[in-house]
Amino acid sequence: MTKQEKNEVIELLKGKFSQYNNFYITDTESLTVAQVGKLRSICFDKQVEMKVAKNTLIKKALESLDAEKYAGVFDSLHKVTALMFSENPKEPAVILSGFRKANNKEKPVLKAAFINGDVFVGDNQLKALTQIKTKNELIGELIGLLQAPIQRVLGALENKDNAQKAEPVAEVAPVVEAAPVVETAPVVEAAPVVEAAPVVEAAPVVEAAPVVEETPATEAPAASEDAAPEA
């Protein structure tokens, strides 16, 4: 490979590393040409780009972009390396896991994975990577959490409405007519009060006539001899 060809590969890899926030570093050394071709086909169907490149060129491409950011994957650049680029952080892990089961092998081996700035090193990380939540899944769960209280309220209102429709309307009990009022016996008028007979005023006490002191009898004067004779 000429220097120019190497530079072209480096530039190509730089473009892929800049385009994707997620990439896997795998070891495909033990796979046959047919198996590698089949793996490529599965990746294409799942919108995962697979690139085989030399470790030295991969490292130069990463260092030219941000050596500190990608330092965690440098130790995994050994043997035959196949890179898998994906927008979905867990899709490459799902592909690798499924490919292994279909071929009853432990290959390809996961050497490292760079997921949104986090580095996962070692083949023992594969199972955990298949369970990563995608951005859409996380958004869906968040929306579900936000909608849950509203759904509970709507469900309660719907259940209440259905219950009201199911319950028969209770007939209004007929109004019991009030018992006729028993007329009270006529009040017996009290006998007219007999007016008391007017009090007869006592006759005025007749004052006793003053006792006339008995006048001493005046002796009649003796007829005067000189009395005139009767006519």
Image (tube, rainbow, N blue to C red):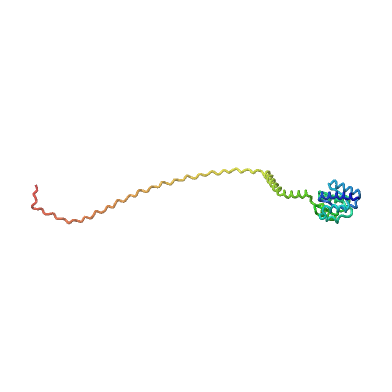
Q: Where on the picture, by quarter, is residue 120?
A: bottom right
Locate residue 200 relative to residue 114 in the image: left or right.
left
* Viewer-side residue, 208 vs 76: 76
Locate residue 24 relative to residue 176 in the image: left or right.
right
* Viewer-side residue, 130 vs 170: 130
* Viewer-side residue, 141 vs 43: 43
Q: Count up the numbered dots.
A: 0
Give residue 181's position: percent from left, percent from top: 53, 44
Q: Where on the picture, by quarter, is residue 111?
A: bottom right
Give residue 21's position: percent from left, percent from top: 81, 50
* Viewer-side residue, 70 vs 218: 70
Give residue 183's position: percent from left, percent from top: 50, 44
